[in-house]
Image: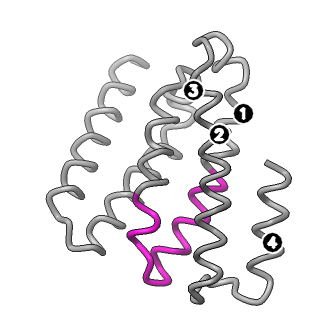
Amino acid sequence: MEKAQADIDKFTKNDKEMRRKDTVEVMVDIMSRIKTAGNELNEQTEEERERLYYLTFNATILIFRICSTLRVAGYPKEATHYLAFNVLCLDNNLILTTVKYLDWRVLNYVELGRAYADLCAYKAASKVIEYGLTKVLYTKKIEE
């Protein structure tokens, strides 16, 4: 994660808003590396995933920050795949499905929905929000 953060800082130094295509390409490459590491975590046992939940959480933060900036810069298509991955990672870790992380999960559902809406993929945006609502209501029900 530290290497990914260092690369993000290095390659956005002169393009913090990620408007240039070369910056976007590098950010996609960085997210791909983070996703590969996240996939390795997701292949672990549930016990191991829970023990290392903070790695998943930190990975989703890096991906979210990049994707949010990309979406605002006019590159929502590049963001959807990785935001969907974030949602999968968050919903695949028992610790990250608790009320403590509910706000973070909701931000990811909304950002993915916004990226789809920016692409005029309203059906997909609606599905994401519907899915997110289901997860939020389930979390609320369990915590009561």
Q: Which mark is residue 42?
A: 3
Q: Residue furthest left?
A: 123
- Bounds of the magenta span? 61-80
Q: Cβ–Cβ below 8 Å for labels 1 and 2?
A: yes
Label 2 or label 4, whichever comes before in sequence order = 4
Q: Are marks 1 and 3 in contact (CB under 8 Å)?
A: no
Label 1, label 4: how many angstroms apart (C-alpha)?
A: 21 Å
Residue 28: x %, y % from top left: 58, 65
Dot 3 and dot 2 residues touching (CB under 8 Å): no
Per the picture, the main secondary structure of the magenta-coloured stretch is helix
Give the residue drawn at x 64%, y 68%: 27
Q: What's under tag 3, amino acid-wise?
A: Asn
Dot 4, how many residues are within 10 Å of its Cα: few (below 14), some (14-19), or many (20+)? few
Q: Amino acid at mark 1?
A: Tyr
Q: CA distance from mark 1 to mark 3?
A: 13 Å
Q: Which three-letter amino acid code belongs to the residue tagged 4?
A: Asp
Decide: marks 1, 4 in contact (CB < 8 A)? no
Q: Which residue corresponds to the image point at 39% horizontal and 26% vertical from the top-left?
A: 139
Pointer 4: what residue?
A: 9
Name the residue that disc number 2 marks.
Answer: 57
Q: Which residue is mark 1?
A: 54
Q: Is residue 136 left or right of residue 45?
A: left
The numbered mark, 3 or 2, whose residue comes first in the sequence reads: 3
Q: Nearer the viewer, mark 1 or mark 3?
A: 3
In three-dimensional space, the C-alpha distance between marks 3 and 2, rounded to whole angstroms, equals 12 Å
Q: Is residue 101 above or below residue 11?
A: above
